[in-house]
Image (spheres, rainbow, N blue to C red):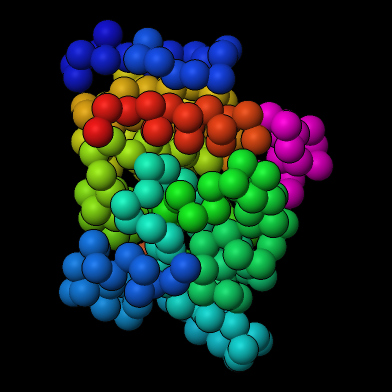
Amino acid sequence: MNRHGAGMVSLASPRCATDVIASDVADAVSDVVQTDLLSCGRCPRLRHYLKQLRHQYPDYWNRPVPASGNTDAPLQIIGLAPGLHGANRTGRPFKGDASGDLLWRVLSQLGIEDQVQITNVVKCLPRNNLPLASEVRRCQRFLVPELSAMPMTSVILALGGVAHKAIVQALDARQVDYPFGHSHCHQIGERWVVDSYHCSRYNVQTGRLTETMFRDVVELAYQFATDQPK
Ligand code: SF4
């Protein structure tokens, strides 16, 4: 047990029983926050990198990438940061690269493409996909309202350990109470968080995460979300 009166459950079964684009989200996350996000340059390292990329890839989005999808969705999927040729190109989280292809293929297989909201804990592309801890912290100003905009009954699927830690921080909980683990399920206050290894090309190529493993954990999180009392 922890200070929230809840703990972590490792899931062997497919059930967790108690043990788009920027404008899609603008209705629920205030317009002020959305406008602030799109013009944000608070992280100097990331701001300079995007500036360079505007010359190198003038047709790319090259700006902070807002959440996409349905804020009434039962499932909120949260990754690390935009990929260079994925979200940083298209302006939509998990669109246009290998990790996005895997995520959308699994969502399609499960028939839940329109039942999710998708975002990243860091909204700007970091070099080598490695945001600094200070950048993760700074971008909480956008993650917190995105979490708050979702129904309390929605379930969060955290992709990777960095996303998991940022979500724990955004929910004002202690890291030590909620260790990351693939297919682990945590109740944090009134919210449930399910963890998955990130669906990156690297994790798939190294065998850390297979497509079957990923489909199982997405299905688990979705089933758990739709089982929540409304
Ligand atoms: S990572 Fe977040 S806080 Fe940093 S510049 Fe981008 S939008 Fe702003």
Question: In the picture provided, is 136 more to the left or to the right than 108?
Answer: left
Question: In the picture provided, is 177 more to the left or to the right than 63?
Answer: left
Residue beneath the point at 56% across and 26% down: 182
Q: Quadrant of residue 168?
A: top left
Give how far across and how far down residue 72 sits, in percent: 32, 52
Question: Against 214, is 125 above or below?
Answer: below
Give how far across and how far down residue 124 sits, in percent: 46, 67
Residue beneath the point at 33% across and 55% down: 71
Question: Against 78, is 24 above or below?
Answer: below
Q: Nearer the viewer, residue 28 or 119?
A: 28
Quadrant field for ligand 1: bottom left
Question: In the picture provided, is 207 more to the left or to the right than 4?
Answer: right
Residue beneath the point at 59% across and 82% down: 60
Magenta stretch containing residue 210, yes or no?
yes
In magenta, the rendered stretch is 199-213
Q: Which quadrant of the figure contains the N terminus? A: top left
Magenta stretch containing residue 191, yes or no?
no
> Can residue 200 be seen by looking at this rendering?
no
